[in-house]
Amino acid sequence: MPLGRLAGWLMLAPALALLFGVFLLPIGWFLAGSLTDFASFAEFWEEAQDVLFSGTILRVLLNTNGIGAAVTLLVLVIGYPVSYALSRAKGLVFTAILLCIVLPYFTSTIVRTYAWMVLLGRTGLINQILLGLGLIDAPLELMYNRTGVIIGMTYVLLPYMVLTLFAAMKAVDPRLLQAAEGMGASPATVFFRVFMPLTLHGVIAGVLITFILAIGFFVTPALMGGPDDIMIAMLIEREVELTQNWPAAAMMTIVLLVVTLLLYAVYSRFADREAPR
Amino acid sequence: MMGPVLRATLLKALVVLLCFGLVAPIVVVTIASFSGDGYLKFPPEAFSLRWYERFLGDHRWRSAIMNSLFIGLLTSIFSTVIGFLAAYALMRGQFRFKAVIASLLLMPVIVPHIITAVAVYFLSARMGLVGVRPWISVAHTVVALPIVLVILQSALRTVDPALERAAMVFGCSRFGVFRRVVLPLALPGIVSAALFSFLTSFDELVISLFLAGIRSETLPVRIWNSLLLEVEPTIAAVSTLLIAVTALALAIDAVIRKLRGGTMAALR
């Protein structure tokens, strides 16, 4: 039943009010308020150069991109076979695999991070097993360094990749694969020449969404990282909580926001697209 | 070249291993929370409820539970009501900029939470809203709304507009159609939306971290504060509670989906 124009807008009003009042307006106000708090443009420019061209921010941006790329790659490599199995599974097997993905997905990020802190600690399960098997002589340093951050973030972000890939793989018409097989293609050929190209847009969407979420990550790197693993979101938090340097926080926010939105624009092109025919 | 049987077996083994890796951390924490040892050891040598006693015996943890529940329930109500109205308007409404509005409403899940948190904190600090629980719910509603919208739009897609028209033809008022046709048909989706928006708020850390102050610490905020000091076993008990709430919400959702499947089949 079509809805009148006025009724439509009235029903949308609360959601739009919330979006403007508690999302767009605060972000705009925070950025504008912090960046116009200078006596002159020269002063602003000096601060901007201090913040954006300092060794710290460059190192942090390098960390953020490096960790984001490593995590995205790992998530893709681990997520691809899981999604593939999920897209082929039926009945109880399907439910079992789905549960293994969905339960962690909806569990609090901090709980998932804590779980890995328990596993990766010096006396944690992983070190106990490795020591018990005699593979190592002294406990490995798996936490409070880059390794810990990458393991923790890979775990937290894996479900996003699996669910994105699953959507693309599920859309592949099985008859196409059967046709290729029937015409004598080997399983490897079917996979690389038919299945992979048909799910490529899903891979790109999955890679983009994982990377977008990874570069904005805060909880896991803050708890599992060491002093050399500071990411941009942690730096923003630090500027606000510790030094209350709002202009610096605002400038870093703009960097993160612009990169996120640009990548998201690319993502939208791949996410909503039907599988190529 | 590997034989097809071998390849299939290898893939199966790999997937089993990976799925095991996905659930293992959650299972380990749950088991460790029942440990009777003085520190976190796995597998525990003895079992006890001592960490739960410590968790529930501490009034600060208890007040964190209350804060989380209060903020979660309020977020659930806010986002389900606001989200339902918006989802219905986006579904049936005919106006310009519909696509733009729909994607704008989804922005809060894409923009890193740290940005939303810092910006809302900037506003809240100036207005004396830090530590005000209903305000934290409002901020959580912003990030829960996209999830609610996705769930409700797919639920409303199953409501046949012809049924609404039929009710109108038989003299039902616009509000009556809403109450007697749309709401009952979309009810399973509404319950799902309420559940997942509650979970979003119950599990949310970054926004709460900035807005909670000392007065309104939620469970994730308290976990965060104690984790910065040490990885102590009490947190395993707290984590198990959060995992249990997630599992419960997923179970309820699954049951509702099953029931909905049943009603839909009955209608056909």
Image (spheres, coloured by chain):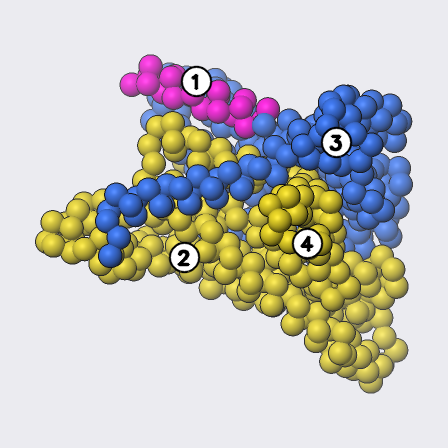
Chain colours: A yellow, B blue
Where is residue B182? Give x, y as percent: 46, 24
The chain that hosts pointer 4 is A
Q: Report how far apart the C-alphas of labels 4 and 1 lie in the structure.
A: 55 Å
Is residue A2 depicted above or below B207 in this figure? Answer: above
- Disc 4 residue type (three-letter): Asp
Residue A181 in picture, x, y percent from top left? 15, 50
Check if mark 2 and mark 3 are on a common chain. Answer: no
Measured from the top left, where is residue A60 in percent x and y? 70, 69
Q: Where residue A151 sits in the image (x, y, percent)?
A: 61, 53
Question: Distance of mark 2 from mark 4, alpha carbons?
Answer: 40 Å
Classify mark 3: residues with Cα within 10 Å, few (<14), some (14-19) or many (20+): many
The residue stretch that appears in magenta: B248-268
- Dominant secondary structure (helix, strand or loop) of the stretch shown in magenta: helix
**Residue tagged by mark 2?**
A203
Structural crowding at the residue carrying mark 2, measured as other residues with C-alpha within 10 Å and reported as few (<14), some (14–19) or many (≥20): many
Labels 4 and 1 touching (C-beta < 8 A): no
Residue occupied by mark 4: A137
